[in-house]
């Protein structure tokens, strides 16, 4: 018996040693990488398309500490500055996608309730998704990653810079304003109507919204009453905190930019009327294929549109679309941006902007549709979207006129650092490192090769 016990204890000791060795063999997760230090750079000899003050032939852009320090025709290279000879090439601001769902996988909709403003898309953001690389290689430097369109009031967006290869938090656009996604029309109708639940009609859509904001008003009133009472009564009891109502209250307080998925002219008018009723502002209508019908009224409210250049007829709500929609709206005073709403289209937003010239846009107007106007919709136009002194050095060097279907992004700089260089091996990436070991999840560009 004693021998059996000793043998059993010996087996346990061996098992413990084996487990210890196995644990020791597991590689430790390295700490987050420090953000890269931007080098000072002079891009010279290019056709510089500023998006705000014209095009500069044989122009130069000087970058210092990640910011644009000078733009002009004759800029001498200061000592120690890296010089990029872009003779015969074109420089534009980085492209900005004002409506994307990339890197959100299957988590884009929380379709369990028509009102979910407390959902955070940052919690679903997969920073290793290869679609971010595709966007970067197509010249996209910033993007608004939105909740889907299943809900009348969806979740809160996340704004990123496409710094593929960095850690998740390093890809977030610093201090970008908060945006929230609304949706009206067929998508919420279909999502909830198929379950025989409210809302199943456009009437239901908008009453769900009104009810939500009525409750948010009451919530705000309760907290305001408490704040007043607490000044003189230390025993005053605070109302119960509700994350959904708190988010709705932030909309009413003007703390969130309201981005609305919406196609039809009648819905634009209803959405703007509800906004006036409850005292918030609509930032932009997204898709907006019937904007041309009520463009003057949209412009009067200061609402922008994020649309496509030539999509129409692909669904019931788009039957009355026309490729002249963006230009008609623009000529009526609406700020117009082009967006992707597609991981595939996102790679060719420069070509999408080029289409606008077929329908009457100037080259500079078309460029602004994928740069400065998109930046305004996101609320970051003071930092990106044009080649102006003091802005972030988010720049693209193209091998051909950038709105041409032949143009390729040769180099993409974000905050003055080169994150994509087509001439380099390894998919042109400068900061991405392939995951070590085997068996781990990877959706990076090397995953495509393995597949």
Image: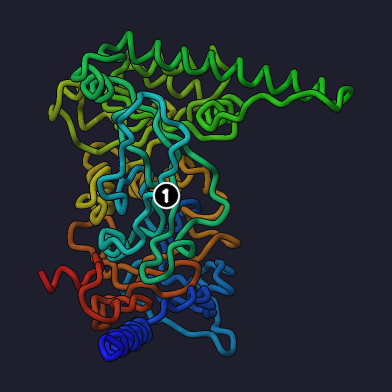
**Mark 1, secondary structure of its residue:** helix
Residue 382 in picture, x, y percent from top left: 57, 50
Q: Quadrant of residue 450?
A: bottom left
Residue that carries the numbered disc 1 in the rendered image: 123
Residue 38 in picture, x, y percent from top left: 53, 76
Side of 65 where 28 appears, left or right? left
Q: Quadrant of residue 220?
A: top right
Side of 449 where 152 appears, left or right? right
Which residue does the image show at 62% across and 26% down from the upper left? 240
Choose between 198 and 270: the one closer to the eye.
198
Choose between 359 and 183: the one closer to the eye.
183
Residue 199 in picture, x, y percent from top left: 30, 15
Q: Look at the image and tell me in which quarter the C terminus lies.
A: bottom left
Choose between 389 and 39: the one closer to the eye.
39
Residue 333 versus residue 40 in the image, above or below: above
Which residue does the image show at 36% across and 61% down from the upper left? 127
Residue 321 in picture, x, y percent from top left: 20, 25
Which residue does the image show at 22% across and 44% down from the upper left? 355
Q: Is residue 25 visible?
A: no
């Amino acid at each position: 018996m004693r021998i059996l016990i000793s043998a059993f204890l010996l087996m346990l000791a061996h098992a413990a040693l084996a487990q210890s060795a196995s644990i020791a063999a597991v590689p430790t997760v390295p700490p987050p990488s420090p953000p890269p230090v931007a080098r000072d750079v002079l891009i010279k000899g290019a056709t510089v398309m500023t998006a705000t003050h014209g095009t500069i032939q044989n122009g130069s852009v000087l970058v210092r500490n990640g910011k644009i320090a000078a733009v002009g025709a004759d800029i001498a290279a200061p000592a120690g500055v890296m010089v990029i000879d872009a003779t015969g090439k074109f420089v534009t601001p980085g492209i900005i996608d004002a409506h994307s769902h990339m890197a959100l996988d299957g988590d884009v909709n929380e379709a369990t309730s028509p009102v979910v403003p407390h959902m955070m898309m940052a919690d679903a953001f997969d920073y290793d998704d290869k679609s971010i690389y595709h966007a970067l290689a197509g010249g996209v430097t910033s993007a608004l990653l939105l909740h889907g369109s299943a809900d009348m009031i969806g979740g809160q967006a996340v704004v990123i810079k496409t710094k593929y290869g960095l850690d998740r938090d390093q890809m977030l656009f610093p201090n970008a304003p908060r945006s929230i996604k609304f949706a009206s029309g067929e998508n919420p109708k279909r999502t909830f109507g198929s379950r025989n639940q409210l809302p199943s009609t456009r009437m239901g859509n908008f009453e769900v919204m009104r009810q939500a904001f009525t409750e948010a008003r009451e919530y705000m009133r309760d907290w305001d009453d408490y704040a007043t009472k607490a000044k003189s009564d230390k025993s005053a009891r605070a109302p119960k905190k509700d994350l959904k109502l708190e988010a709705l209250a932030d909309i009413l307080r003007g703390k969130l930019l309201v981005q609305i998925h919406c196609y039809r002219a009648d819905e634009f008018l209803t959405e703007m009327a509800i906004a006036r009723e409850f005292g918030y502002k609509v930032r932009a209508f997204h898709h907006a294929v019937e904007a041309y019908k009520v463009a003057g009224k949209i412009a009067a409210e200061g609402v922008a549109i994020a649309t496509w250049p030539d999509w129409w007829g692909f669904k019931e709500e788009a039957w009355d679309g026309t490729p002249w929609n963006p230009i008609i709206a623009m000529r009526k005073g609406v700020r117009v941006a082009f967006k992707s709403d597609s991981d595939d289209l996102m790679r060719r937003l420069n070509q999408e902007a080029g289409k606008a010239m077929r329908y009457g846009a100037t080259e500079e107007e078309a460029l602004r549709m994928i740069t400065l106007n998109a930046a305004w919709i996101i609320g970051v136009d003071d930092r990106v979207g044009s080649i102006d002194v003091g802005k972030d050095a988010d720049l693209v060097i193209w091998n051909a006129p950038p709105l041409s279907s032949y143009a390729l992004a040769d180099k993409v700089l974000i905050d003055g650092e080169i994150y994509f260089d087509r001439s380099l091996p390894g998919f042109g990436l400068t900061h991405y490192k392939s995951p070590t070991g085997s068996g781990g999840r990877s959706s990076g560009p090397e995953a495509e090769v393995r597949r």
